[in-house]
Image: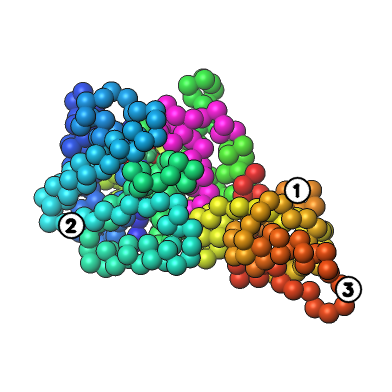
Amino acid sequence: MSLKVLKIGTSLLKGNERTSTAEVIGTFSQCISEGIDKGDRFVLVTSGAVGLGCQCIGIKKPPVDVVSLQAVAAIGQGQLMALYDQSMRKFHRRVAQVLLTRSDFGSRSRYNNASNTLKKLLDWGVLPVVNENDALSPEELRYGDNDTLSALVASALEADQLILLTDIDHLYSSDPRMDKEAKPIRDIHNAKELNSLISISGAGQGGMWGTGGMSTKLDAARIATTSGIEVHLADGRDPKTLKDLLNGCRGGTVFHANPKPIGNRKSWLAHALRPVGAIQLDQGACNALNHRGASLLLVGVKKVVGQFEANEPVKILTPEGEELARGLSSFSSQGLKTALESITSSGASPIVIHRDVLVLTKGQFS
Ligand code: GLU
């Protein structure tokens, strides 16, 4: 029995001249329901609220101003749930709406709270249908794409697999719209291969890469694979794709899971939190963190960057300014500056970031 997080993008749900959104949802629901019958468990992360909202009020393109966009999403989200509810009922399955915002993952207790609700729904055999809370998320706190959200949900639940269904068959070595030589990539084996793709993905926004663009797919893959979750990117335009995937076939591109996952807490620290400041270290402290899994002590701090409160997430930087780690500082930025001014060479140095709330992220966010 495996737990799969399935993300379905807007480009698939909008349907086409021959197939309506309701029919598309009907086909996916049938596959999911067959998967549940076989013993797998699913969390569905679905887009489509904005698209359906636009359809409902008869506008062709999503509005550009944020308030109208949020209002359109509020209309469409109800429609979206109604469609999933109707089609899953045909297979005697219930659905539950779970709308998340970035701030729901911002504190450990809210993160656990969201995970526990999702787990309870799964225990009850109900299909959680997750979307970003588009109607309410403030602009600066929006994920904006469900790729990242789906990877965070998969990590929070320690899922076995994340399936990203989109309107392209593979990732390519470059943007196939621009480059005839672009080659499909079937396997991404490790973080090094993934990072090299992330560095060329800037050109791949929108269009053929799906709503969130290639870069958000790669970000999602980075989050999930470091948490030990295998990611399949597959072309959801063909109804057979999901059926095959759920019968054990592979997606067009498979991102292989890191065999040494960082664990749920470290995944939360590394991926769900947004650092609000930074602490730069001397070389000795970098070595202690990097090679000995040590806590960060005051004596190793060289510089404090930005403003933060105690227990807020910060980046930890090398003397060259590169990101080495992330963690929760037990000092505020002001408290840390004051402590640095009065540092003495005698006695034990206070802990600035305990190793339990510190995660190495070197090379992950370059
Ligand atoms: N949450 C948005 C919606 O439901 C879509 C985000 C995305 O396309 O990934 O319309």
Dominant secondary structure (helix, strand or loop) of the stretch shown in magenta = helix
**What range of the chain is rendered magenta?**
200-224
User: Which label was assigned to residue 321?
Assistant: 1
Label 2 secondary element: loop
Mark 1 to mark 2 CA distance (whole Å): 50 Å
Front-most of 310 and 102? 310
What amino acid is at disc 1?
Gly
The quadrant of the rendering that contains the N terminus is: bottom left
Which residue does the numbered mark 3 point to in the structure image? Answer: 345
Q: Position of residue 36 (x, y in %)?
A: 23, 58
Pick out the residue farthest to the bottom: 347
Residue occupying the point 87% across, 77% down:
346
Pick out the residue farthest to the right: 345
Residue 219 part of the magenta segment: yes
Q: Position of residue 283 (x, y in %)?
A: 82, 58
User: Is 140 located above or below residue 173 in the figure?
Assistant: below
Residue occupying the point 74% across, 55% down:
304
Q: Earlier in the sequence, mark 1 or mark 3?
A: 1
Q: Quadrant of ligand 1?
A: top left
Disc number lying in front (1 or 2) = 1
